[in-house]
Image (cartoon, grey):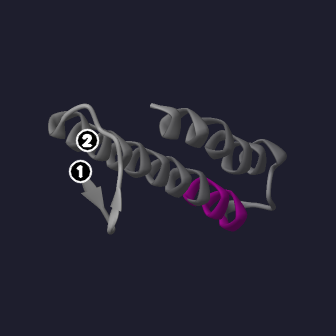
Amino acid sequence: MYFQGERIKVKSEREFILGIVRMGLSILIASLIISIGVTSLVTAQYEQPIRMDALRTATFLPMLIVPICIGL
């Protein structure tokens, strides 16, 4: 099978399509988690001065979950 002009080894076309779908879903989940983290950070910033727990949640949660989603 060819992908961007280069030959890649894939057991079957179905496996290739499932891999692309899985990658797309993991990117979608990761972007959703990052947007939730950023939203919580902005909300915490406007309601009152930034609390450390909101800042920690907004920055570290996506960093933990994104590699897990990509690994799926």
Question: In this figure, which residue is indicated by the disc labeled 1?
Answer: 1
- The quarter of the displayed image where residue 62 is located: top right
Q: Residue 2: x percent and y percent?
A: 26, 57
State the extent of the magenta-drawn residues as a range. 39-46
For the point 38% across and 45% down, the residue is 23
Q: Amino acid at mark 1?
A: Met
Label 1 close to label 2 by CB (< 8 Å): yes
Q: Residue 5: x percent and y percent?
A: 32, 68
User: In terms of depth relative to the viewer, which is nearer, 16 or 49?
Assistant: 16
User: In terms of depth relative to the viewer, which is nearer, 15 or 24?
Assistant: 15
Q: Residue 9: x percent and y percent?
A: 34, 41
Question: In this figure, which residue is indicated by the disc labeled 2?
Answer: 16
For the point 66% across and 36% down, the residue is 64
Secondary structure at badge 1 equals loop
Q: How many marks?
A: 2
Horizontally, residue 1 falls left or right of residue 69, namely left
Q: Main secondary structure of the magenta part?
A: helix
In whole angstroms, how far apart are the C-alphas of marks 1 and 2? 9 Å
> Please, which residue is most extreme toward the left here?
14
Horizontally, residue 34 falls left or right of residue 16, namely right
Q: Residues within 10 Å of mark 1 (few under 14, many from 20)?
A: few
Secondary structure at badge 2 equals helix
Assign the C terminus to one quadrant of the image: top left
Q: Residue 51: x percent and y percent?
A: 80, 50
Is residue 40 highlighted in magenta?
Answer: yes
Q: Amino acid at mark 2?
A: Phe
